[in-house]
Image (tube, grey):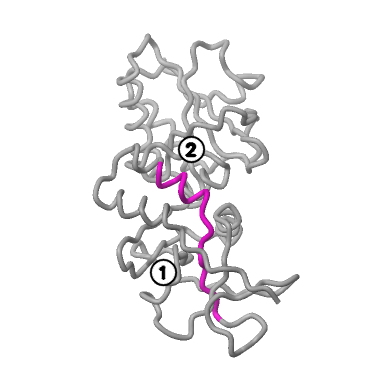
Amino acid sequence: MLLQPTPSNPELLNAMETIAKQDSPENRRTLYDAILNSQLLVPVAKPLGNPNMTGLQQVLGTTDVEFIVVTNKHDQTALLAFTDEHAVKAWKSADNFYIASNAPDLLQMALEMNVAAIVLNVAGPTARGELMRWEIRSLAAGVLPESTAHVGTSVITPPPDAQVNFIPLTNKPSDKFMSGLKDTFASQPEIAAGYLMQAVIDQAAPHLVAGVLFSKEMEEDAIHNVMNELGDKISGWLPQDEFIDFIVLENENDIPITPSSDALFYKRA
């Protein structure tokens, strides 16, 4: 049997080391792009096949794989992933068992397992990091989160050739979430109305989108500041496995779903 080489991911490791020194939007985009193009090592609880074979395991056919789930610093469940064998051994020096997984497959698996995070290189030795649930969902959809200061919310830019469809809500959010959403929009005097819907990017799962209708023309920086305020406040009402995007609506005829009245959740008196 031909054994596959153990991945090393030098570009991802370099991006992690760079962002540890300077967390800028440009460096974070480089990191996300490196993650999407990586093949990571994911530890498993026991060897697959040969019980005496440590290190990289071969997944053949319908082999059952038992992944290791840990608790992160936020007391949430998380998967472990490593850039290379050296990072695995920094975490556990002997009796290591792990598989190699393309990042898109790992991201999708994390969503299906309903973990809150993926911890990268938990023991270093040079750089470590953590992808939160909202980042995982964005990256699994093939888009790069652009805002990292707001837990649970993100501004995303779909690829140029991505198909984006807006649809009515398939499940009504909780009363607690809707109440918090309305109060948040009401707290911003520049907002005239808010519309809640879902977006589907290519074949990804639907996610929440809030359409924002301003009462006057706004400069780009001012819009960005309002969106940041919305993100900070709404994050406290979001379920753990959800994230929300924002779109700016030009006018009441710009609502991307019909009837627009079904999406309207807030209108300033």
Q: Position of residue 200 (x, y in %)?
A: 63, 35
Residue 33 vertical placement versus 103 (above, below): above
Q: Nearer the viewer, residue 189 or 199?
A: 199
Q: CA distance from mark 1 to mark 2?
A: 25 Å
The relative height of residue 204 versus residue 267 in the rendered view (above or below) is below
Q: Decide: marks 1, 2 in contact (CB < 8 A)?
A: no
What range is drawn magenta here? 30-45
Q: Position of residue 247 (x, y in %)?
A: 48, 25
Q: Which residue is mark 2?
A: 244
In the image, residue 42 lies in the stretch drawn in magenta: yes
Three-letter amino acid code at the position of disc 1: Thr
Residue that appears at 68% across and 75% down: 64
Q: Tell me which corner region of the image, top left, top right, bottom left or bottom right, holds residue 106.
A: bottom right
> Residue 33 at what x, y percent from top left?
47, 44
Residue 67 position, x and y percent, is: 56, 72
First-in-chain label (1 vs 2): 1
Residue 11 magenta: no
User: Which image quarter: residue 204?
Assistant: top right
Which residue is at 37% across, 45% downward? Answer: 151
Q: Secondary structure at mark 1?
A: strand
Tell me if residue 237 comes above or below residue 43 in the rendering: above
10 Å neighbourhood of mark 1: few (<14), some, or many (≥20)?
A: some
Q: Nearer the viewer, residue 75 or 110?
A: 110
The residue to which callout 1 is attached is 71
